[in-house]
Amino acid sequence: MLYYHYFILFGLFVVLVNFIINNILFRNIKNFKMPESELQSPPLVSVLIPARNEEKNIKRILNSMLRQDYKNLEILVLDDNSTDSTADIVRQFCIKDKRVKLVKGQPLPKGWKGKCFACHQLSKIAKGDYFVFTDADTLHYPDSISGALAALMKNKLDVISIYPRQIAVTFAERMTIRFIHFAILSFMPLILVKHTKGPFFSTAIGQFFLFKRQVYEKTGGFESVKDEILEDINISKQIKRSGYKIMVYDGSDSIFCRMYTNLHDVVKGFSRFIYAAFDCNFLMECIALFFISLIFLVPFISLPLGIFVFGWSAKLLVLNIIQILLILAIKIVLSIRFKERILDIFFTPVSVAYIAVIAVNSYIQSRFGSGVSWKDRTYGAADEKGTGEFEENGKKI
């Protein structure tokens, strides 16, 4: 039992060191300013927004884009076969500002995932020197484009992906969505993301991508990952395979997003990508869940058991308490940095349990259920690599 506690402490120490380094590297885009030479003749940036049934969000993002302090923009919105009033709302903006253009999406062909095909269509008609792909449910402060472009130029990168502040209101949202920053800063060595060429250390988030145009075209863009459910991670791997540089940054003061609004949407959304995050490898998913649970869940369970059931010695109890304090220290730093509820740190074991259960559901849905669903499209398990069927609006295609 003593060796077990030392093993957990060692694991937490490794995570803590990585967490400290990542907090330094995960810089906020507000810290970057455009080079004076670029301000004199700012390059054209194409803002590319795929939109499928986004009538609740599209007005908000377009208003925020038209208020950008970076003015040399074209804003292209692809109506991805929406059945609501998304297209009508965009048309109203097209009349008000010529920078906004509506693109009618083509029917989704076999072998493509919906978002990949929408982004691919947008890239084919974009005229900018830089491409910004951003989701329709994001909200941007006026400096989001200029800050992102400055971060890319200052750091001599080819592509960057920016993590928005994830708005989480309900308990289910807070227990799951907040896990995104926790996972990235705790487990992913960002120093290797930035400085290694191998695709193994790759990460990104599809809510905001900024590409140099020529890099996007040379790497194959979204066409190179057309059959991937987790297109953002896979396109970051493709970028590194092609010899280009990518890095992730903190956009929590410039870009905001509320991914889901209730437990049902949380489960549905996370089930879509957790299994895919492990390349649809059941063994890899099990190993990851085992170690995350062992390090971040078991210490909270073992402490009361050690006190009231097993009668552990004072030394074992102290080691267990130190483990819990280290976990809470990481969570406190995250809560302060991303302005989250401090009291939620005491629900850390609940958060890990939520993720574990949803991960199991993600595997079951992908392999044995109807498949993973998103935006009224359901992709079967076989279709994870582009070989199966999918349903759209309840019709098999």
Image (cartoon, rainbow, N blue to C red):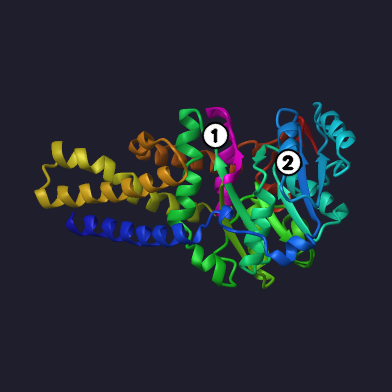
Residue 218 shows in the view: yes
Marks 2 and 1, the one that precedes in the sequence:
2
Q: Observer-nearest residue: 167 or 278?
A: 167
Examine the structure image and report whether residue 267 is included in the region drawn in magenta: yes
Q: Residue at x 11, y 42 (%)?
A: 311
- The N terminus: image quadrant: bottom left
Mark 2 or 1: the one toward you:
2
Residue 319 vertical position relative to residue 178 in the rendered view, above or below = below
Per the image, label 2 sits on a secondary structure element best described as: loop
Q: Which amino acid type is marked by label 1?
A: Val
> Disc 2 marks which residue?
67
User: In the image, residue 204 lies at what x, y percent?
Assistant: 60, 55
Q: Pinpoint residue 139: horizontal percent, then vertical percent.
A: 65, 38
Residue 155 is left or right of residue 82, and the answer is left
The quarter of the displayed image where residue 86 is located: top right
Label 1 sits on a secondary structure element that is: helix
Q: Residue at x 37, y 58 (%)?
A: 15
Q: Is residue 301 above or below residue 43?
A: above
- Is 186 or 394 nearer to us in this picture? 186
Q: Is residue 309 magenta?
A: no
Q: Left of 396 or right of it: where is 368?
A: left
Report the amino acid beneath label 2: Arg
Image: magenta residue range: 253-278
- Identify which residue, 14 or 387, lies in the foreground: 14
Q: Position of residue 113 (x, y in %)?
A: 74, 47
Specify the quadrant that holds the C terminus.
top right
- When asked about the image quadrant of residue 332, the answer is top left
Cα separation, mark 2 vs mark 1, equals 34 Å
Q: Residue 223's x, y, as percent?
A: 78, 57
Residue 267 has which mark? 1
